[in-house]
Image: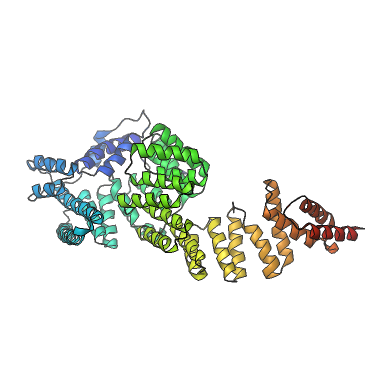
Amino acid sequence: GGSAMEVEEQPQLMKGELRLALKHLSEHGLLFGAKWAAEQLNGFASEVTADEAAAAQRMSTGQRKGGEEEDLVDLAKTYVDVKEYKRAAYLLRECRSSRGVFLRGYATYLSGQKRKQESEIDSSAASAATLEYEAELSELHKELARMNGRGELDGFCLFLYGMVLKALDLEGEARKAFQQSVRSYPWNWGAWLELASLCHSQPQLQELSLPDHWMKNFFLAHMDLELQSNKQALARYLDLQRIFPHSLYIVSQMALAQYNMREFNSAQSAFEQILSQDPYRLDNIDTYSNILYVKEEKTKLSFVAHSAMKNEKYRPETCCIVGNYYSLKGQHEKAVLYFKRALQLDSHYLSAWTLMGHEYVEIRNTAAAIEAYRRALDINSRDYRAWYGLGQTYEILQMHFYSLHYFRKATALRPYDARMWCAMGQCYECLDKYPEAIKCYKRAHENGDREGMALNKLGRLYAEKILDLEQAALHYENNLRILDSEQVNSQQTIDALLFLARYFRNPSLNRLDDAEIFCQRLLESEMVDREEVTALMREIRQYKQ
């Protein structure tokens, strides 16, 4: 069929699998994966019934069962639920069942993460906590590596192994472990997301060996978004939506794709549809606030900020929404404060670093801006907004070679984004590299330059730097046509009229009538030197006699 789906499936079986997966994930304390599974489970059309018997056959998890040990593991799981991690790990010290081994390791890992976060807030005890954390991690690493060598890790323990490897900065090995994990147990969305965070390019994605399972469709769509293949992402999500018509997750992912394509109106209405059905949902709502920010919809943004504050004051998303609100009001110092608060709550919260960078650019604190953008790129080297921000910051510092390097990175990630090409063109202009600048502005124009800078720049460069007046006239006239069709009257209109009136006064071009019309239009405007235009008009009329 003409479907973008990699793996076709029967909804009844999928629903059965998700229902069982929800139980497995909950039993393992994997709250994020369980929440995602439950949301998709409720996304099916109402007439789809779950085929649990067929699902159960497919989902034999190959776990070593614990028999009597199960009660102890259940007790430890309740300790994990109330965040008593060390207590849970100690209780499970003798356990041999798969779930017991997983929960002991996972509790140890979580207790380390919790202490690491606490030490960022209270720096006095930081170094001791860090040493203890690293010792525990390497112990855990040794134990899991031994078991993995004997093939004793199930899908859940492989997920844990991947998390430990990632925490030890062993990216390649972590990528292997997460692939093994999703092949062994494809229903844990958390494992797919971890794998996605370690895939930085199309070639790396091609190298993965993934299971032929319907969950792969969700992963590939997510990767399309990550790698800015937004059109393809939309196609995949449309296909998934046929099976999960009620999934708000899918609607919100589609809204992200539209946002990336700068289709702000469709993205906005998608987010508003989500909020009308689930008013307390905060996932990706910071992106909705970015749209309201770009469209300068102050009242709506103020409403979203207020309700987020009432709903969940201490969520990084909330802080970002409030930061956007203050930024739109021009209170940049206050905005920085809220982006900082978002980062205190989650230091890996990507958009807060980037948005904070933008605020520092606004208040001309270039050193802080550069630091913020670099932190964003440490988290995700594909964040084109941070590369673009670095380019702009070095522009302010008049360091054009640096700017050029950063804008190049941004255009590589977003080759269809006219703003990136315009920025690069301006850079080349500053370096007096006019042919290169012209190439960039042409790319910007081909990619639907919405700000309409490119044609005007091309006209000026051909006229003043390349001295090819015919090409200049071509671009100015093209721009004038577009401006007139949009009924825009700006400085660009004046630039085009003035150049074309001067150029067409040459009788051999047979455009004297046009030249006269352009002069008349210029005289109606306040923004020109009337004497020059009147003289030009006289000259043209003499030629016409």
- Residue drawn at x 9%, y 42% is 72
> Residue 295: x, y in percent?
52, 44
User: From this viewpoint, which residue is outermost toward the top?
Assistant: 47
Q: Is residue 302 above or below residue 154?
A: above
At a point 45% along the width and 53% down the height, the residue shown is 228
| Residue 256 at least partly seen | no
Q: Quadrant of residue 469?
A: bottom right
In the rendered structure, the answer to whether residue 22 lies left or right of residue 462 reads: left
Instruction: Report the front residue among 278 and 321.
Output: 321
Task: Classify residue 221 as left or right of residue 80.
Answer: right
What colour scheme has been applied to the protein in the rendered image?
rainbow
Residue drawn at x 13%, y 46% as measured from the top left: 88
Relative to 411, does residue 86 appear above or below in the rendering?
A: above
Q: Residue at x 69, y 68 (%)?
A: 464
Residue 260: image x %, image y %? 47, 49
Residue 418 on image: x %, y %: 56, 56
Residue 265, horizontal then vertical, whole percent: 52, 41
For the C terminus, give its image quadrant.
Answer: bottom right
